[in-house]
Amino acid sequence: PSDGAAPRYKPPATETNPALEDPTPDYMNLLGMVFSMCGLMLKLKWCAWIAVYCSFISFANSRSSEDTKQMMSSFMLSISAVVMSYLQNPQPMSPPW
Amino acid sequence: MKNLYIFIAVLFIPWSFSLAKYDEFEDGDDIMEYDDNDFAEFEDVNEDAVTESPQRIITTEDDEEEATVELEGQDENQEDFDDADAQEGDTESEPYDDEEFEGYEEKPDASPSKNKDPITIVNVPAHLQNSWESYYMEILMVTGLLAYIMNYIIGKNKNNRLAHAWFNTHRELLESNFALVGDDGTNKEATSTGKLNQENEHIYNLWCSGRVCCEGMLIQLKFLKRQDLLNVLARMMRPASDQVQIKVTMNDEDMDTYVFAVGTRKALVRLQKEMQDLSEFCSDKPKSGAKYGLPDSLAILSEMGEVTEGMMDTKMIHFLTHYADKIESVQFSDQFSGPKLMQEEGQLTKLPETKKTLLFTFNVPGSGNTSPKDMESLLPLMSMVIYSIDKAKKFRLNREGKQKADKNRARVEENFLKLTHVQRQEAAQSRREEKKRAEKERIMNEEDPEKQRRLEEAALRREQKKLEKKQMKMKQIKVKAM
């Protein structure tokens, strides 16, 4: 029984159920911004590097409906945090051990 | 497009590094020249001042060979200083003074007793060396980022290949059963796109419709997040599988009223807690299906025994036993409304909308290490889905069953109303109070005393009427009770 009825509607654009959505990209985005601010203000290189990682992770986990502009802005912010830390203090990072 | 952005941004990093290095050199030179001119003035004034300040001017980018030369030069300078014969010595050795190290501060202490102790050449601190080796942490970071990007590309491609392999295997079966295969909701007309709709790097959707009995079928290929390195590492600790989730929405007239689920015990326990309909209608714990010949791994949750009897026919049992390892959960429900919603305190809620749904969750074999070939083994499961659609249409409860089902549904609705009754009363009460307050304010704000009086009287009359009505009602109830 393949074509009994006329074709029906389009997909209910897959439910935007806030409880079901994966919060990872949003958390990572926020974390990335926080770390890059820390890196810029407190001139901590490792903060800036973690911010870069956070923004990459947020990008990898993002939904297609996410704004690319926000991704790019968080990404650019973290890159600029790294660059600024090195401009202010070109010494290499020292490991914590 | 996204990849392009990443590569451009990654190129930024080494470029900015090289910029940083050169800037420092230029700044250093400027400082030196400026200070040279300054000290020319102070030559006569204070020997101490002159000799100490060159020490403080530090440039940081010198090689080790230059370092040893400077040390000797500086020693000579110190001797001259000790002999109080400073000025010429200073001017001659100023070029050397200006290229001292930071660590040089130790020298003045050592040099007076130079003849007694050997020269201790201090190692140049790592951050002053002009070599790439000292930046090993940074190189590590960049390598990590590159590894992440590589994994992203590889993971994304793998998921893509798996999705298309699945679709190619299932395409024929779907096209023979559904008139509309693949739709992304953008076209005005209902035409088959014949393609998967990519929602994410790890989620692919497919909407099929145009079949008798069902409104439509939404298939979601929920792959593992292979594109995220963190996820890949987490999965090494805790293996997980790709999942195929199929949701069939039935027409209202094509399915009777029952709630039924079968699946792995763990999945059923979780669903019973999470899903609105299963928690309300299936109060017992998941029962073993051994009675029907199902393997131990599977359990059954059902609204009433009759439903289980009806559902477990030979063909269904055959499907369930043969593909038990791939089945996570199967749920037939006429009261399906998704997972329980978190309700805030004091918020009025209506009963959530329900739809007659068949929900299937299958695990892709391979437990993460799937290859496109594994997708073929899921084809029989799709046949099971099609069979279930027809079965759900055919299966009807008998009279007793229907009565029980109706009673259950009425019970659930009553419970819900009772729960919200208090909230609704409170809401109505607060609305009435608001009205009264607004009225009083209006009366107060009226400037004209005449109008005020009139409004007050009107309000009083209304109150009296209400009281009378209430008294009437009470009388009526009393009469009825008698």
Image (cartoon, coloured by chain):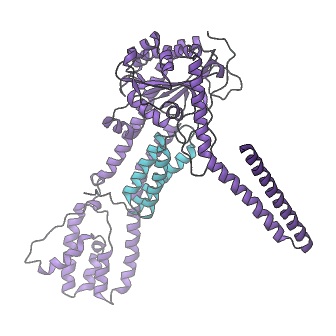
Chain colours: A cyan, B purple
Picture layout, residue B200 above or below residue B376: below
> Image quadrant of residue B297?
top left
The mark tally for this picture is 0
In this view, the residue in front, B290 or A81, is B290
- Is residue B94 in sight in this rendering? yes
- Residue drawn at x 32%, y 57% as measured from the top left: A93
In this view, the residue in front, B297 or B45, is B297
In this view, the residue in front, B289 or B412, is B412
Q: How far across and down, in percent of the image, does residue B15 sit? A: 43, 50
Q: How far across and down, in percent of the image, does residue B316 sit? A: 46, 14
Q: How far across and down, in percent of the image, does residue A32 sit? A: 46, 52
Q: Quadrant of the C terminus of chain B?
A: top right
Picture layout, residue B249 above or below residue B447: above
In this view, the residue in front, B329 or B39, is B329
Picture layout, residue B340 above or below residue A55: above
> Image quadrant of residue B48?
bottom left
- Residue drawn at x 55%, y 14% as measured from the top left: B391
Q: How far across and down, in percent of the image, does residue A15 sit? A: 59, 35
- Residue drawn at x 9%, y 75% as measured from the top left: B117
Q: Residue furthest bottom?
A: B45
Q: Is residue B72 left or right of residue B313?
A: left
- Is residue B224 in sight in this rendering? no
